[in-house]
Amino acid sequence: MVISRPPEVSVRRILDASIRLGNGSRVAVIGGGPAGSFFSYFLLTMASQAGMTIGVDIFEPRDFSQQGPPGCNKCGGIIYESLVQSLATDGICLPSSVVQQGISDYTFHTDEGSIRIKPPSDEKRIASVRRGGGPFGATRSLLASFDGFLLTLAEGKGARIIRERVTGVAMVEGRPYVTAQSGLSDQYDLLVGAMGVNSPDLKLFGGCATGYTPATTTKAHITEILLGKEAIDEHLGDSMHVFLLNIPRLKFAAIIPKGEYATVCLLGKDIDQALVDSFFCRPEVMSCFPAGWTPDSTRCRCFPSVTLGGAHGAFGDRFVTIGDCFVSRLYKDGIGSAYRTAKAAAQTAFLEGIAKRDFNKFYQPLCAAVASDNRFGKAVFTFTTLIKRLPFLRRGVMRMTGSEQGGFAAPRMSSVLWDTFTGNASFPSILARTIHPVFLARLFYEIMMGCVSSRNRANTRDGNGGWRAGKTIPRRGDDLPGG
Ligand SMILES: Cc1cc2nc3c(=O)[nH]c(=O)nc-3n(C[C@H](O)[C@H](O)[C@H](O)COP(=O)(O)OP(=O)(O)OC[C@H]3O[C@@H](n4cnc5c(N)ncnc54)[C@H](O)[C@@H]3O)c2cc1C
């Protein structure tokens, strides 16, 4: 008797069937930050649309209503325009109880002066939010936590929140086995790593046998300053203040208005207290605070890690990492990266399968694109480092931006600065604009004019010389000093 071999397609279907999510499948998500919540939200939405029941357990020890670092995922809390739009498309509208303040524009500060850059459109679509329950010692009730809001969204879709830290991960008979701090342990069909990069537990993914190596990171700094609504309105307004100051190891810094508080973020290389102190000594920084204000040593602050690269061995059979755990955009839009990786991983898991080859085929390309974008990002941030270091370039950049904001020229430099710091455009597109001949010609012209005007000013020096730090650069036609 001849036994006929089943056709290849059927064999593949049988193999596939054993490594797909199906009715009654169970998924463990480690970490209920933005990545974990978005993943659960999208997976459960797709399952319910297909009439399927999938059990999702989100392990998250943090209580996002708590004040200070224990209740907070430590970040600047800027939700960029591109993410606000994507969320709206997915039917997720940030409620006013979560948005601390709408950001209307950016103000750039250098030692050559300050300048406001308006957004390409007049809508306020950049929001500042709080990740946790507000700074330590906040006496007034603050608005709701962004991370808490997302976790509630996922819970609303049917996710079970387990308020525990995961302490063990292993593959047992090819399936992920998760152990929590209390000893609770269970087997799942899929394990999703969404622990971010500030967790000491990333080494647990070693138990997934994919050779997981976390992304490279460096220390950043965040401090929360209580100024009161009136002082915020007067000194910061609705503007996000970005500082390009020539301080070693500091890439850039930002002051973000949030209701009664200002959140100060410092990004660079291994930020430490000495660097923070030198930042607060700068007149460009102090000019954003009320006269006589001094940094208070008891304020709520932290030194979280920020990602610089991507992780390796980030997925395998029945295992996938998302958000900072895998890859995030360089120095910006980390929450947007969490959203995009979480959504792509959820779509892959639900529609394609949960084998390594599925993640490799359908999920990896998105993450590879982020990693490749970051390589261009390094070149873009080299340009901002040059702006910080070279006074003639800084002057040229500020002059060029000033004339654009005054409506005298097309917003070439303004759009480069805007997109570099808002996460609105990809790094290659920003880089392409900076090497455009018209951009370079205009920058060269403004550098030359800047040199001439500073020489004239030196000749008629009034003691201070130059534009005063902290003052908005006068726009062309507004009686430019020496120019
Ligand atoms: C100084 C600074 C400023 C930033 N500013 C911005 C900004 O303005 N806008 C922006 O978009 N991005 C910003 N980012 C980046 C942003 O914070 C991250 O990209 C984003 O939080 C990543 O989300 P995630 O869910 O991957 O990780 P996380 O937000 O880190 O969430 C990880 C979660 O996992 C939980 N967890 C950890 N270990 C375990 C465990 N063992 N068991 C169970 N749960 C665990 C944690 O409690 C946490 O809730 C900033 C980052 C830094 C450092």
Image (cartoon, rainbow, N blue to C red):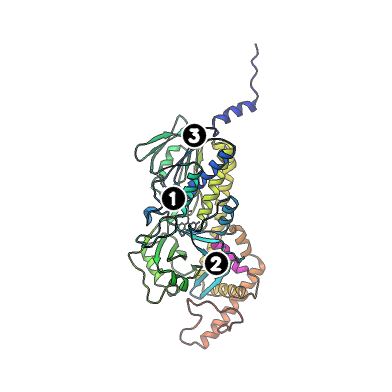
Magenta residue span: 411-422
x and y percent of residue 114 in the render? 51, 74
Pointer 3 or 1: first along the chain: 3
Dot 2: element: loop
Label 1: which residue? 197
Whether disc 3's CB lies below 8 Å from ligand 1 is answered: no
Label 2: which residue? 104
Q: Nearer the viewer, mark 2 or mark 1?
A: 2
* Distance in Å between CA atoms under marks 2 and 1: 30 Å
Q: Residue furthest top?
A: 1
Answer few, some or many: residues within 10 Å of disc 3's Cα (few below 14, many 20 plus, some between 14 and 19): many
* Distance in Å between CA atoms under marks 2 and 3: 45 Å
* Distance in Å between CA atoms under marks 3 and 1: 24 Å
Pointer 2 or 1: first along the chain: 2
Dot 1: element: loop
Whether disc 1's CB lies below 8 Å from ligand 1 is answered: yes
Kindly identify the residue that appears in the image at 54 percent across and 47 percent down. 341
Counting the numbered discs, the total is 3
User: Which amino acid type corresponds to the residue marked 3 in the rendered image?
Assistant: Asp
Whether the magenta-drawn stretch holds residue 418 is answered as yes
User: Which amino acid type corresponds to the residue marked 2 in the rendered image?
Assistant: Ser
Who is closer to the viewer here, 16 or 239?
A: 239
Label 3: which residue? 189
